[in-house]
Image (cartoon, grey):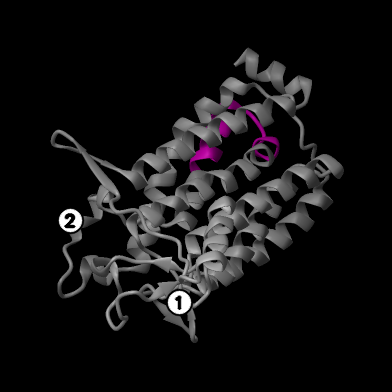
Amino acid sequence: MFWLVDKLLTMNLLTGLPAAIPSPPQGVWYLGPIPLRAYGLLIAFAMVVAVLLTRRRYERRGGDGELVFDVALWAIPFGIVGARLYHVITSPHDYFGPNGQWLEIFRIWEGGIAIMGGVLGGVIGGYIGLRRAGQRVGPFADSVAPTLLVAQAIGRFGNWFNQELFGKPTTLPWGLKIDENHLPRGYEPGTLFHPTFLYEVIWNLTMAGVLVLLDKKFKFKGGQVIFLYVAFYATGRFWIENLRIDPANVFLGMRLNAWSAVVLIIIGVVGFLIAGKRGASTRVEPHEMAEENVE
């Protein structure tokens, strides 16, 4: 996406015309009666990328790469359920309000998932899968940490296709164009908005690279990399969340997701320090592999 920003800036300087990031004309295509939604396809692709990258990283830590697929069978379904539950809990009026219909909770293909809930659900599912295999969580979690950021970056393009979750109005040359039928009430056609999807893509990919570099440079203990992921992701989410203008529950003057990000930052920092004191290995030891093979 950097090339797109550079191209738009160049166009603006050369032509004098207002530059902007265009929104895709559609986010769903039909294969006969079957809808193919960009968001769903991107989420599926992100999951595949995360699994393959995690397998490679886990093998480098001495783990069994095939275990990644087994754990994914637990983590992915739990992640989907967690993402939906978090959205429903934080947006109850959409389903239980005067005009809400609670049966729509199950219509997940129409949108309404939350990354924070997805990560939490995935952690629970992954923990179950690892415990069933008799393997420690630390090495696996440290393997998956940067791949989660890559997957989240890919998934954010779904918001671009859906023309949703953008930020406040802006006059910056990389402002995002929104079609009139997606324009929030009270804003004039032609208004440009902060492309928060792009900000999070850039942040997540940058932090993924930072995690990989830090993991190579320092001798972390088991679990420290995943807690760094939590702190890094939540830091970016905090400032991006405060740019968004989509309806959200507010507590003490701040969006609920921003408060969640603050809590996650604290958890990330404290967890990093505790994991460092515990001193567990971030690698899968040979005797652990032997125990898995016996089972």
Label for residue 196?
none
Question: Residue at position x 60%, y 53% from top?
Answer: 204
Residue sitting at the far bottom: 253
What x and y, as percent, mark residue 29?
Answer: 24, 42
Q: Amino acid at mark 2?
A: Leu
**Is residue 30 rendered to the left or right of residue 245?**
left
> Which quadrant holds the C terminus?
top right
Judge whether 134 appears above or below 278 on screen. above
Image quadrant in which you'd find residue 10: bottom right
Q: Secondary structure at mark 2?
A: helix
What x and y, as percent, mark residue 163?
Answer: 35, 61
Q: Nearer the viewer, residue 131 or 32?
A: 32
Image quadrant in which you'd find residue 101: bottom left
The answer to whether residue 180 is seen in the rendering is yes
**Is residue 286 rendered to the left or right of residue 192?**
right
What x and y, as percent, mark residue 250?
Answer: 43, 80
Say which residue label 2 marks.
103
Q: Find out whether the residues at labels 1 and 2 contact each other: C-beta distance under 8 Å.
A: no
Q: Nearer the viewer, residue 269 or 182?
A: 182
Label for residue 168?
1
Question: Residue at position x 55%, y 56% from top?
Answer: 7
The answer to whether residue 75 is seen in the rendering is no
Residue sitting at the far top: 294
Image quadrant in which you'd find residue 233: bottom right
Q: Amino acid at mark 1?
A: Lys
Question: Residue at position x 49%, y 57% from top?
Answer: 116
* Badge 1: residue crowd in 10 Å (few <14, some 14–19, many ≥20): some
Q: Secondary structure at mark 1?
A: loop
Which stretch appears magenta?
124-140
Judge whether 129 appears above or below 24 on screen. above
C-alpha gap between disc 1 and disc 2: 32 Å
